[in-house]
Image (cartoon, rainbow, N blue to C red):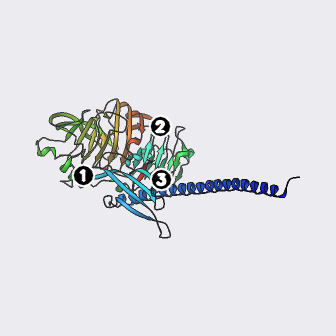
Amino acid sequence: MMSTTKTKGMIVTYALVFGALFLLMLSGLLGFILLQLRQSAQKAAAAESLEIAEAGIDFYRWCLNHGLVSACQGERDYFDPGGNLLGKFSLQANSSLTCGQTIYGEARSEGWTLKYPQLKRKIKVFYGQASLAKYSYILNDNVWIGGDHEIRGPYHSNGGVRMDGENQSLMTSAKQSWICTVSFGCSACPTSSGCWTQGSSCVCPGVFTTTQNSNPNLFSYPVPSFDFDGITIDLSQMKLAAQSGGIYLQPSVNINSQGKGYRLKFTSQGQVEIWIITGLSSTYAYSLEEGWHYDYFTISNQYLYQTLPVPSSCSLIFVEDNLWPEGTVKGKVTVASANLINPNLDTDAVLATNLNYTVNDGSDGLTLMAERNILIGPQSPDQLELKGIFLAQKGRFSRNHYPNNLREKLEIVGSIGSNGRVGTQWISGSVIVSGYLKRESAVDVNLLYQSPPLTPTIGAQYEVIGWQEE
């Protein structure tokens, strides 16, 4: 029989062994729990650090929209909603400037909490302002889009829209309804298209179609009217910028008494040939604004005045005269035609041949602004290709009616802004009698946020165009 003393010794031994095992397991469990708590706290701190970094980015955006970028950089405190200091962020930013204007902004923000300052999160964000390149067309008048016209990109008019072509994006009008006249093909009111007669007038929906080409599901009206005056640039500002850092061309008559304007030919080497025009021949023409008249758009005499590199720091050309641009654009260039010396004279830009880019990856771009009209000339080629943002501030983008002057195809890659009615094809009855038989228009998304200098913007605020964590 086992003695009582020996039995008690074994019990004590078992108790010590199992107690040690229990303590070991408990300490391991407590260590695991503490580790999980620590990791959870660190994960929370990392998430908070990201939020603090984002707060720094939001602060930068406010600074950018208020012109205070240089004063907003550096390290700053971050407080929670209760006013308690939670952490800090460090902000560094730079902007891409050309002709004194911010094209886009870049900000890097690093955030951390006071409790875990070693857990830092970094964010890099790009900001930009949407330009006129947001739209394929933006008009301030009624328009009739022919059945041959294919449009890829948002189209807006403050007037009514008859859309008989093919649209792959929104077609919007500021009008609930409008009077469709004979010049818009409504000699017989197309009641099957939703129009109705009201007295002697044909009243149609803001956007309507008479063909099967378009997509009415993408028609929207009425929408808020677009402030067309709001996209006009201060031409005086452009002139000063060109005189100080770009290229400024005074009225050609000041250089040559026979001067009638300038021909600008862009080269793929980043230069521009400046020709002074001394002779123009006439072409019998018709427009709704002028009736039958003579256009003087065809160059008959000219001479090379200068060949200059387009300045990279301010690639802006201001021409105080009528303008004939052409060629291949390298880089991002803005050309403006306006007479600010004589308030009674408004200038035009005439497109006589192709405008192209050296590459199509977004590195190149053109903005062409005319004080009055941008007109395609009578001698334009059968296959005309135009790339760029074209803005006719007071007038229209169009091609006048030249009898027996038919062309094959017009392709536009970019955007058209026109105060007046757009038209590049003329119809008599149901027969095309002048202009381009086939037309294609596509918006250039590469120019939306990184457009040529001083291109008109849509809205005053900078928007996020890129976000990444570093």
**Nearest the camera: 121 or 125?**
121
Percent x, y of residue 324: 24, 39
Amino acid beneath label 1: Met
- SS at badge 3: strand
Q: Decide: is 353 above or below 182.
A: above
* Image point (82%, 55%), residue name: 7
Q: Earlier in the sequence, mark 2 or mark 1?
A: 2
Does residue 16 appear in the picture of this structure? yes
How far is disc 3 from disc 1 in space, using C-alphas? 37 Å
Q: Nearer the viewer, mark 2 or mark 1?
A: 1
**Mark 1 packing: few (<14 Cα in 10 Å), some, or many (20+)?**
many
**Mark 3 packing: few (<14 Cα in 10 Å), some, or many (20+)?**
some
CB contact under 8 Å: marks 2 and 1 = no
Q: Which residue is mark 2?
A: 147
Percent x, y of residue 457: 36, 52
| Farthest-out residue, bottom | 83
In the drawing, what numbered circle is on residue 238?
1
Does residue 398 appear in the picture of this structure? no
Amino acid beneath label 2: Gly
Q: On the picture, is 137 further left or further right than 266?
A: right
| Farthest-out residue, right | 1
How far is disc 2 from disc 1 in space, using C-alphas? 38 Å
How far is disc 3 from disc 2 in space, using C-alphas? 20 Å
Amino acid beneath label 3: Trp
Percent x, y of residue 411: 38, 34
Which quadrant would residue 6 be assigned to in this image? bottom right
In the drawing, what numbered circle is on residue 178?
3
**Nearest the camera: 74 or 380?**
74
Q: Earlier in the sequence, mark 3 or mark 1?
A: 3
